[in-house]
């Protein structure tokens, strides 16, 4: 949207936080779930179950929107809702491999 690279955004974030004492926390994966579910058009029960899954597993490392997408994918699979990694990845502008890696972290015991 702003046509800049991720590092420039990260640097700006760090400067704002440090110089102006502004607390700009990154949204959690759970906070992304409702909008991703809406874009995918999945039933509302999926949203609640995906949030529960993410809250329980507390995944770390990676882009929160990718983690949210993986949580939705896992939840849909558990509920026998046909959804592909490719469909989920397209909604969040990531690769299906990225979503797969996050899904693997959520499903490992």
Image (spheres, grey):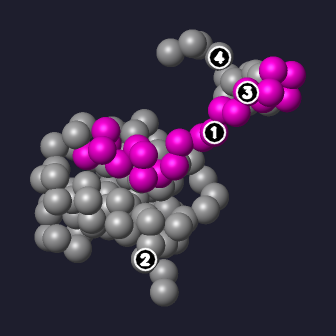
Q: Which mark is residue 4?
A: 4
Disc 3 designates what residue?
22
Left or right placement of residue 30 versus residue 2 in this view: left
Q: CA distance from mark 3 to mark 2?
A: 36 Å
Viewer can see residue 65: yes
Q: Which mark is residue 25?
A: 1
Tag 3: Cα neighbours inside 10 Å, few (<14), some, or many (≥20)? few
Precedes in sequence: disc 4 or disc 1? 4
The kind of secondary structure element at disc 4 is: loop
Precedes in sequence: disc 3 or disc 4? 4
Precedes in sequence: disc 4 or disc 2? 4
Residue at the spot 17% in from the left edge and 59% down from the top edge: 45
Q: CA distance from mark 2 to mark 1?
A: 27 Å
Residue at the spot 43% in from the left edge and 64% down from the top edge: 54
Disc 2 designates what residue?
107
**Residue 96 included in the magenta stretch of the image:** no
Q: Looking at the image, is mark 1 or mark 3 nearer the viewer?
A: 3
The picture places residue 19, in percent across and down from the top left corner, at 86, 22
Residue at the spot 61% in from the left edge and 62% down from the top edge: 60
């Amino acid at each position: 949207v702003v046509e800049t690279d991720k590092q420039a955004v990260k640097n700006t974030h760090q400067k704002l936080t440090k110089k102006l004492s502004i607390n700009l926390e990154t949204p959690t994966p759970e906070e992304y779930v409702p909008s991703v579910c809406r874009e995918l058009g999945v039933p509302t029960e999926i949203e609640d179950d995906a949030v529960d899954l993410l809250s329980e597993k507390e995944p770390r490392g990676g882009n929160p929107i990718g983690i949210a997408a993986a949580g939705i994918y896992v939840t849909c699979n558990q509920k026998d809702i046909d959804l592909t990694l490719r469909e989920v990845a397209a909604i969040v502008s990531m690769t299906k491999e990225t979503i797969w890696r996050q899904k693997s972290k959520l499903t490992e015991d």
